[in-house]
Amino acid sequence: MDIWSDQNRRSYLAITAHWIANETGSLRSRAALIAFHRLRGGHDGKTVGEIVVNLLDRAAITVKVSTQRRLN
Amino acid sequence: MDNASSNDTTMKEIERRLHQRDIDFDAADRKVMCFGHVIDLSSGRVIDAFTKTRQLADENEDWSAPPAPNVPSRQTYEEAVARDPIAIGRTVVRVIRASGLRRDAFDDVITNGNAKGWFRRGNNIIRVNQVQLLRDVRTRWDSVYHMLNRLRVLQTVRLMVVLFFVLLTDQLERPSITSLHSQTIVILPSIELHHENGR
């Protein structure tokens, strides 16, 4: 996860996911962009935390994690 | 993530919200410090040990270093380091980049030098790329490296830089900088030497 500003002082938040995939018997390092979000207004730690969870929701990651947990 | 404390707050908030939904998440366990940031902090400490001038101490021109030997190419590595080549390089870059006027003049030196065959490496006339010197910025990773690298690329321009300052002397706002044209000639070779030895 990273937050940065462009030349016009607009802030952006990006989240990438990194994992090891088992592809036809061999392990491969994979990565994907999960979210790329324009941050409006202030971004103190608490607000960023809220936004991150919302973005994880939008990427349908939180749903998968909680389902998996209930199955266990 | 970098090491700012607001990141701890973010992680705590993520933890709180996920716990509400019964999802396991440990803020401390899940926080991975940004590796690039850690590397930058480490290299910054090494650079600080070599250089006396902090990068943001822009107001104090540091000409207090001991004078260079008469023949700069015979400096030892220790002598070159003792003259603080990073701080000197930083000052040179800052002075040349101080205004649009000076950057344009520097650009003209390269244009004219290329047109008239001023730049040489050994006995060969070479062309110098039409680029500006780069400032280092405390918050920008690798910028000290890029600054020194560009100084090195432009090292053949150094004699022309002296000429450049002689021409510019009348226009300089700060009196302390007028001594630069006599200093520059010994400064840039010492940076060059620093690099030669560092390779």
Image: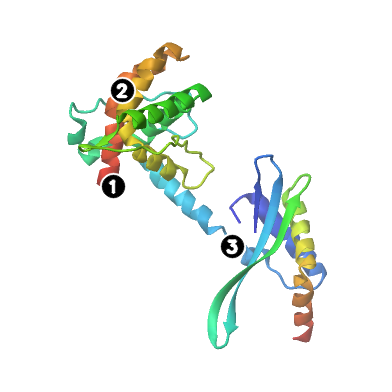
x and y percentages locating residue A17 in the rendered image: 64, 68
Q: Chain of mark 1?
A: B
Q: Is residue B135 visible?
A: yes
For marks 1 and 2, the one nearer the N-term is 2
Return the residue nearer the eye: B106 or B184: B106
Q: Residue at x 73, y 64 (%)?
A: B15
Foreground tag (2 vs 3): 2
Q: Which of the 4 image quadrants contains residue B49?
A: top left
Residue at the bottom extreme of this rendering: A25
Q: Say what secondary structure mark 2 lies in.
A: helix
| Label 3 Cα neighbours within 10 Å, binned few <14 / some 14-19 / many ≥20 | few
- Distance, label 2 to label 3, CA atoms, is 47 Å
Foreground tag (1 vs 3): 1
Q: Is residue A58 left or right of residue B145?
A: right
The residue to which callout 1 is attached is B198
The residue to which callout 3 is attached is B32
Q: Amino acid at mark 1?
A: Gly
Q: Amino acid at mark 2?
A: Gln
x and y percentages locating residue B141 in the rendered image: 50, 47
Q: Amino acid at mark 3?
A: Val
| Label 2 Cα neighbours within 10 Å, binned few <14 / some 14-19 / many ≥20 | some
Q: Residue at x 44, y 29 (%)?
A: B107
In the image, residue B16 sits, relative to residue A27, either above or below, namely: above
Q: Are marks 1 and 3 on the same chain?
A: yes
Which disc number belongs to residue B183? Answer: 2
Q: Are marks 2 and 3 on the same chain?
A: yes
